[in-house]
Amino acid sequence: MSDQGKPKLKVFIKPQFDEAHEPDGLDVVLSIESPDLAEGSPIVPFLSIDKPAVIKDGVKCSDEEGELPTTHNALDNSAGLSWTVGRQTCGEVKFEYRGLLGSGLAIIPTPPADKIYRNIVEWDLSEAPDGTRAVWTFGEGPAPVERIGTASILSDSVYMAGPVHSNPPTPITGSISDYCGYYWFGNLPPTVEVIKDMHHALFLKICDFFEETPSASNPYRGFARHTGPRKSFNGSSFTRSHIFDYEDQIAEAEDYDLVRRLAYEMAYNWLGPPVTDGIDWLYKGIKNCLSIYFPFRNKFRTGHYFQATINMLCTRYYTSPLINLPHEELLKLVPTDESAKELLLARASAFVVSMDIRTRWLAVGKIMRPVEDLAIKPFSKRRATGEPHGIEEWIELLQPLLGEETRERYEDMLAGRVILIDVRLFGGGGSHILKQTDMEFLDFGMDRESFEEGVVRGLKAGSRAEQAGLKEGDRIVKSSYLWRCVDHFEEKMTVAIEREGVEMEIMYWPRGFEMAKSWQMVKVDEE
């Protein structure tokens, strides 16, 4: 069947604005060409992991016979909802609702099938303020933008409408803007400005690495979203795009922090979750490994970036209080425990980086970058073709070089045994090594939930937090980034509190008194 013969799945979006001309919602019409659904069949689900960004009772559904009765039910193992039809459908089915701005997972419901569609997104800006732009991961509106594939293309992508700024500044057919862009509202902070400026060049280098030619068919678009005072410094990756969320304290983040985040999110485009079951911890490790190499190798940052990033990963891993927790127990904690999430990422990174360095020494004179050439690049190809690309395939690909050591390293990690990285690092001139360094374990001195709930809970007697003057029940007005303290050993925690009507600021070092056997990258002459 030619592309023109495939059924249409069309999204028609009309942005809504408040009195100040700020975007505050989307009127969406999802049209499905002749789905031929029997009574009781599911029509579309919202797969949002939080909650559907739509008023469930405001949904209207119709087909060529008129109003189509529907019912909605909670999805199994999800906070999303699914709508089912109350009679046999006839012809084109339209699903209309009011949604919010964001990712497709939250605002675009799609048919639950692997059927191939002509996915079309079109915008109506007729009532929008002057200067309004509408951008989808796969192109800028308001004219229709079409993408052939499964319906997941619509949900696993990003939608942005309003007074959008971008780099390149304006879309020009036949230019960079056909396949790449960075988009935001308002004025970007200086640190994010730097990321905006390197976005296109880094994308081209990563395309070279994965042997892909960037084009309108293979685009990549980044979106920056200011969340105001709400704490956020994270990225959300989607098909060929990502959203970077930042808030009012972004000035506390350093250049390297943002460069690492950009490289990590971009790598997702080729190295997303495996098609095999399980949490994608391995891919988190691979993406973190590449976030070390891409900016340094392609001369976006100097060797100091490389050294600082290795040291950050070592600090995060070796000074985690959960470092010896078996992997199965760790995975059980990940959904609700921030320390467990941080260790999972750090452990996965140590696993991949340690194997990368080990294989480089074994392959001297044969393969310059064995893990990249023998495993990472083949993984990206397997992902593209839908072949399995999980831990067993990783072991299989590296076994010819590492032998049984490959599985032994995996089993050691599962048991919670500490992963050691070859102190010689990458050889060459031998200018740097890993040096064993005693470092204090991470310890915020209270329950981590205290910072989310805004009240000091579970204050540890004798901790540095208590010694600095914090007391159980203090109301937390504001605090510095927790992740900075996790990643940067010397980072101090500043907490603004209110106690008995009096506000005060308390600073302390969020480290315990027990020492961890950690490692840091140093110059040989600085040993």
Image (cartoon, rainbow, N blue to C red):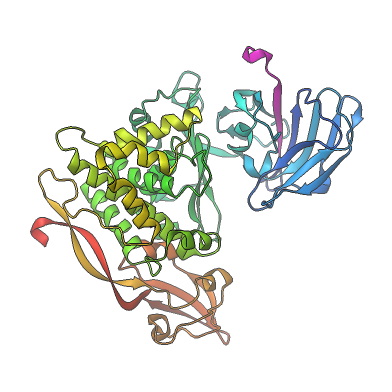
Count of residue discs: 0
Give whichever of 510, 362 is nearer the camera.
Answer: 362
Q: Residue furthest left?
A: 525
To which quarter of the image does residue 148 belong?
Answer: top right
On the image, the x and y values in percent for residue 266 come to 43, 39
Judge left or right: residue 381 versus residue 23.
left
Q: Is residue 2 magenta?
A: yes
Query: Could you tell me which quadrant the N terminus lies in?
Result: top right
Give whichever of 461, 478 is nearer the camera.
Answer: 461
Q: Residue at x 52, y 48 (%)?
A: 278
Judge left or right: residue 297 versus residue 459.
left
Q: Residue at x 47, y 33 (%)?
A: 383
Judge left or right: residue 379 versus residue 129.
left
On the image, the x and y values in percent for residue 433 come to 16, 55
What residue span does the magenta drawing correspond to?
1-16
Q: Residue at x 35, y 77 (%)?
A: 512
Above or below 475: residue 402: above
Q: Is residue 149 visible?
A: yes
Above or below 233: residue 493: below
Q: Is residue 377 magenta?
A: no
On the image, the x and y values in percent for residue 381 come to 42, 29
Q: Is residue 168 visible?
A: no
Q: Residue furthest front?
A: 404
On the image, the x and y values in percent for residue 439 come to 27, 70
Query: Could you tell me which quadrant the C terminus lies in?
Result: bottom left
Give whichever of 112, 52 is nearer the camera.
Answer: 112
